[in-house]
Image: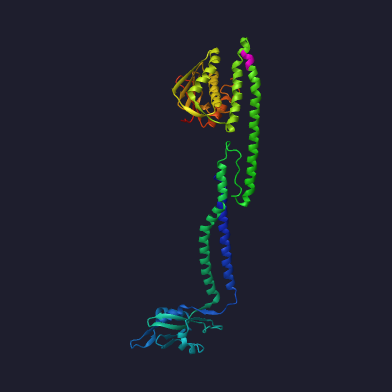
């Protein structure tokens, strides 16, 4: 079972892989589109505006000047054609470097602009500039500046990478959280069907799995399974009808045979009576099983009375064979069940004890439990489960068809009881049957 692949895991894993590949392809396509777009030119790095604002200070006489800060010196070293101009909040203007003539008339009006990006078309791209509102040591100001420049493709690649990574991460988180929930919800019908299958057993015939709760793709499998259940039910019904018919057909010839044996005077003929009684008991047990399968009515059964009646019926036959039977009532008990079935189950246990045990049988009643004990050689512990199998014989040459204990167990289980085997104090076998007591 552990080596079988999980459908749920495969659906989740493959769905996540598909989503991640789709997102990655979309992000790559976005980047390629912008990189290969017609947008061109060189853009000025906007960081120069903030460096410029921090470099504008008052000198010792209160006059506005540009102080070459380390940041400004670094930019000037990297971009020798560095220039900027600023309009302060008091209307004063200060410049640094060679401001192009194209932008000189714009400087007094910088306060009318909040932000702008200009791309120079021709090298050395001194007309590539940025306009930003910044705050420095002298307060708020509007700055136009030109420093290091870079192609648009670099900017768009960086921006698209950031955007794509953000989208990819967000969708990945959503996929990891949502996909298992979606798959689990999609498979809830399959899980429900699996739970229904766990409740299928031999006593629950005519059952069909629900087809409307499973996905359309699983429907053919469920319908095929329901068809198999229907065929099994039909076969079981045919088997039950055969058993019932066979048992009914056997009753008449067995009854006639028993009557002839009872009226015979020859000792040899009368010695056949135990075998005929065994056949009669077997046919009745088959009928009992058929009745129980079809919901036969239950009665209140006093086990003490039932045990005495069965012992009284079997006593003459046992005495003729040199056997003895005793009924011990330790505690009376009442159960619910089919009287005929319980009687024949007890009869079979007594006959089995007589045939395979010793010459003394004790039937003990203890509340809702009964025991049949013999003084034979007992049943080996390794054989105690197998003797309930149909056609199994503890001794190969023993008489009987090997169905007795199997039928007894079925009758007991149909009555909700348990059957156990133990060893008696004298070494013989004890077959204990436990039922549920009723009041």
Q: How many marks?
A: 0
Q: Residue at x 65, y 39 (%)?
A: 231
Task: Please say if 12 is above or below 245.
Answer: below
Q: Residue 356 at what x, y percent from top left? A: 54, 19
Residue 191 is inside the magenta segment: no
The quarter of the picture where the N terminus appears is top right
Task: Please say if 222 is above or below 76.
Answer: above
Q: Residue 26 at what x, y percent from top left? A: 58, 66
Q: Is residue 139 left or right of residue 276?
A: left
Of residues 409 and 116, which is closer to you in this image? Answer: 409
Task: Please say if 331 is above or below 177.
Answer: above
Q: Residue at x 54, y 25 (%)?
A: 345
Q: Name the dominant secondary structure of the magenta segment.
A: helix
Question: Can you tell which quarter of the image residue 410 is in?
Answer: top right
Q: In the rendered image, is residue 73 in sight? A: no
Question: Colour scheme used in the picture?
Answer: rainbow
Q: Residue 263 at what x, y percent from top left? A: 63, 12
Numbered range of the magenta stretch: 258-262
Q: Residue 350 at what x, y percent from top left? A: 53, 21
Q: In the rendered image, is residue 251 in sight? A: yes
Q: Is residue 130 left or right of residue 288?
A: left
Task: Please say if 294 is above or below 103.
Answer: above
Residue 259 is inside the magenta segment: yes
Q: Residue furthest left?
A: 60
């Amino acid at each position: 079972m552990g080596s079988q692949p999980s459908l749920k895991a495969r659906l989740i894993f493959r769905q996540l892989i598909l989503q991640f590949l789709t997102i990655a392809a979309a992000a790559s396509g976005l980047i390629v589109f912008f990189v290969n777009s017609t947008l061109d030119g060189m853009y000025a790095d906007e960081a120069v505006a903030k460096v410029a604002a921090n470099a504008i200070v008052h000198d010792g006489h209160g006059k506005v000047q540009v102080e070459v800060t380390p940041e400004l010196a670094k930019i000037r070293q990297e971009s020798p054609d560095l220039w900027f101009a600023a309009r302060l909040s008091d209307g004063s203007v200060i410049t640094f470097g060679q401001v192009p003539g194209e932008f000189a008339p714009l400087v007094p009006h910088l306060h009318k602009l909040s932000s702008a990006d200009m791309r120079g078309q021709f090298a050395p791209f001194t007309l590539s500039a940025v306009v930003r509102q910044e705050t420095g040591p002298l307060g708020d100001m509007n700055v136009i500046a030109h420093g290091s420049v870079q192609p648009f493709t670099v900017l768009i690649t960086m921006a698209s990478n950031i955007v794509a990574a953000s989208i990819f991460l967000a969708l990945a988180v959503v996929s990891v959280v949502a996909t298992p929930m979606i798959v689990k919800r999609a498979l809830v019908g399959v899980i429900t069907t699996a739970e229904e299958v766990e409740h299928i057993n031999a006593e629950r015939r005519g059952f069909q799995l629900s087809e409307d709760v499973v996905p359309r793709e699983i429907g053919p499998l469920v319908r095929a399974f329901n068809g198999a259940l229907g065929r099994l039910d039909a076969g079981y019904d045919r088997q039950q009808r055969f058993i019932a018919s066979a048992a009914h057909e056997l009753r008449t010839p067995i009854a006639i045979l028993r009557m002839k044996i009872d009226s015979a005077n020859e000792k040899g003929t009368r010695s056949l009576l135990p075998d005929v009684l065994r056949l009669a008991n077997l046919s009745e047990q088959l009928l009992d099983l058929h009745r129980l399968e079809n919901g036969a009515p239950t009665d209140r059964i006093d086990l003490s009375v039932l045990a005495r009646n069965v012992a009284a019926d079997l006593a003459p036959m046992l005495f003729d064979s040199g056997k003895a039977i005793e009924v011990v009532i330790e505690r009376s008990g009442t159960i619910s069940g089919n009287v005929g079935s319980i009687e024949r189950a007890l009869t079979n246990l007594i006959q089995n004890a007589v045939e395979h045990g010793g010459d003394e049988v004790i039937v003990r009643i203890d509340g809702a439990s009964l025991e049949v004990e013999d003084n034979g050689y007992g049943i080996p512990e390794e054989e105690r489960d197998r003797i309930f199998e149909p056609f199994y014989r503890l001794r190969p040459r023993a008489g009987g068809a090997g169905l007795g204990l199997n039928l007894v167990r079925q009758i007991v289980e149909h009555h909700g009881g348990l059957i156990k085997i133990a060893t008696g104090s004298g070494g013989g076998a004890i077959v204990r049957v436990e039922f549920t007591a009723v009041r």
